[in-house]
Amino acid sequence: MNTNKKILLKTFTWYIAHLTVATSIAFFITNSVKIAATIASAEIIWEAILFYAHEKAWNKLGKKIK
């Protein structure tokens, strides 16, 4: 398996694991599947946006760190 496919597969499996944990925690707090799924979905989307912004910042600032 080439590196890009492996990274993509690893990313996908990580997000599935994370979504499962986030949904479970939200369900235990709210006792509602609908609310838990909404919270977990919003969290996953927000995390992806923040991760992208974080990577962009590190790519820009990381060049200045020696």
Image (spheres, rainbow, N blue to C red):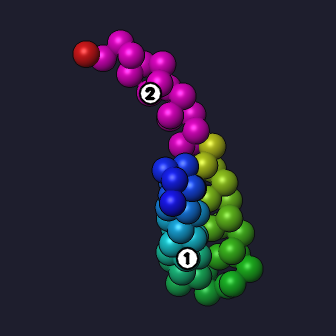
Q: Which one is earlier in the sequence, the residue at label 2 or at label 1?
A: 1
The residue singled out by tag 1 in the image is 20
Q: Position of residue 55 (x, y in %)?
A: 50, 34
Q: Position of residue 24 (x, y in %)?
A: 54, 80
Q: How many marks?
A: 2
Q: Is residue 38 above or below residue 47?
A: below
Q: Is residue 48 above or below residue 6?
A: above
Quarter where residue 42 is shown: bottom right
Q: Position of residue 32 (x, y in %)?
A: 67, 84
Who's the residue at 44% across and 27% down the image?
58
Seen as rendered, the residue at the extreme left is 66
Dominant secondary structure of the residues highlighted in magenta in the image: helix
Mark 2 near mark 1, Cβ–Cβ under 8 Å? no
Residues packed near mark 2 inside 10 Å, few (<14), some (14 to 19) or many (20 plus): few
Quarter where residue 63 is shown: top left
- Confirm whether the magenta stretch covers residue 63: yes
Which residue range is magenta in the image? 50-65
- Confirm whether the magenta stretch covers residue 45: no
Q: Is residue 36 left or right of residue 61?
A: right
Could you say which is closer to the camera, residue 17 or residue 29?
17
Whole-number angstrom distance, CA of label 2 to CA of label 1: 28 Å
Who's the residue at 25% across and 16% down the image?
66
- Badge 2 marks a residue whose secondary structure is helix
- Badge 1 marks a residue whose secondary structure is helix
Quarter where residue 38 is shown: bottom right
User: Does the rendering let one see residue 26?
Assistant: no
The residue singled out by tag 2 in the image is 58
Could you say which is closer to the camera, residue 25 or residue 64?
64
Q: Amino acid at mark 1?
A: Thr
Who's the residue at 53% across and 68% down the image?
13
What label sits on residue 38 in the rendered view?
A: none
Q: Amino acid at mark 2?
A: Trp
